[in-house]
Image (cartoon, rainbow, N blue to C red):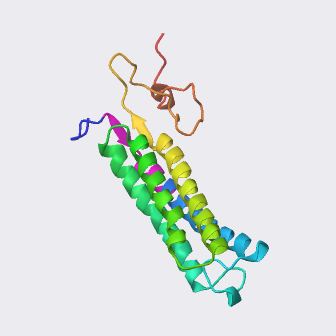
């Protein structure tokens, strides 16, 4: 048990590598969304009309902000997994509400309605990507301690899905019990 009384242990490497991958996806959602909205639908979003299909430097900054948001969400998730009861439920609510704010914010700006809607959709897709990817990463990053009465020994390479029926003792070369 940790000092918080949690029986969970968090695989930080798995969590943060998933968070880094999520950051890349979030940035790409912004770039692809901009390309589709500007290039295919011909709606000037995230940059002036004459900036081209991918926009301007502001689009790159916006994509980097999405990546930073994903990394901040990973930090929040790590904190919740270590310290909070029902961490994934709280995480879902927090990220859902932040995504709602990001989707509504474009309507408070002085742009034309098609640009506002397009920006809101891009923000919504990026938020959903961050929420769903990090939620699934959280499932694999939490290692639960066995409860009383449950056997402590797990398959040797359980997390990788390799040799699922081999116990730790067998993996180390110790003889099997009869």
Q: How many marks?
A: 0
Q: Answer with the quarter of the image where residue 115 lies.
A: bottom right
Find residue 79 and report its horizontal and vertical position in percent. 33, 51
Q: Is residue 11 magenta?
A: yes
Task: Give the farthest residue toward the right.
Answer: 40
Q: Is residue 105 above or below residue 166?
A: below
Task: Give the farthest residue toward the left.
Answer: 3
The residue at 52%/67% (across/down) is 66
The residue at 46%/27% (across/down) is 154
Q: Relative to residue 68, is residue 28 drawn left or right? A: right
Task: Give the farthest residue toward the bottom.
Answer: 50
Q: Which residues are magenta?
A: 7-17
Find residue 32 and report its horizontal and vertical position in percent. 68, 69
Q: Is residue 110 magenta?
A: no
The residue at 58%/68% (across/down) is 27
Q: Is residue 105 above or below residue 12?
A: below
Q: Answer with the quarter of the image where residue 62 lies.
A: bottom right
Find residue 105 and report its horizontal and vertical position in percent. 50, 68
Q: Relative to residue 17, is residue 42 drawn left or right? A: right
Foreground pick, 171 / 19: 19
User: Is the N terminus in the top left, top right, bottom left or bottom right quadrant?
Assistant: top left
Q: Is residue 163 above or below residue 141?
A: above
Foreground pick, 112 / 150: 112
Foreground pick, 85 / 5: 85
């Amino acid at each position: 048990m940790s000092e918080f009384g949690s029986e969970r242990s968090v695989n930080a490497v798995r969590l943060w590598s998933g968070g880094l991958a999520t950051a890349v996806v979030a940035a790409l959602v912004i770039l692809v969304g901009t390309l589709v909205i500007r290039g295919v639908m011909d709606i000037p979003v995230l940059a002036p009309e004459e900036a081209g299909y991918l926009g301007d430097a502001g689009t790159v900054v916006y994509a980097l902000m999405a990546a930073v948001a994903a990394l901040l969400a990973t930090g929040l998730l790590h904190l919740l997994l270590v310290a909070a009861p029902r961490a994934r439920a709280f995480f879902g609510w927090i990220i859902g509400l932040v995504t709602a704010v990001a989707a509504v914010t474009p309507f408070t700006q002085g742009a034309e309605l098609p640009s506002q809607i397009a920006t809101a959709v891009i923000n919504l897709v990026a938020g959903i990507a961050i929420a769903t990817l990090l939620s699934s990463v959280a499932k694999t990053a939490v290692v639960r301690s066995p409860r009383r009465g449950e056997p402590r020994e797990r398959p040797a390479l359980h997390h990788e899905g390799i040799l699922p029926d081999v116990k730790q003792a067998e993996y180390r070369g110790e003889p099997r019990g009869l």
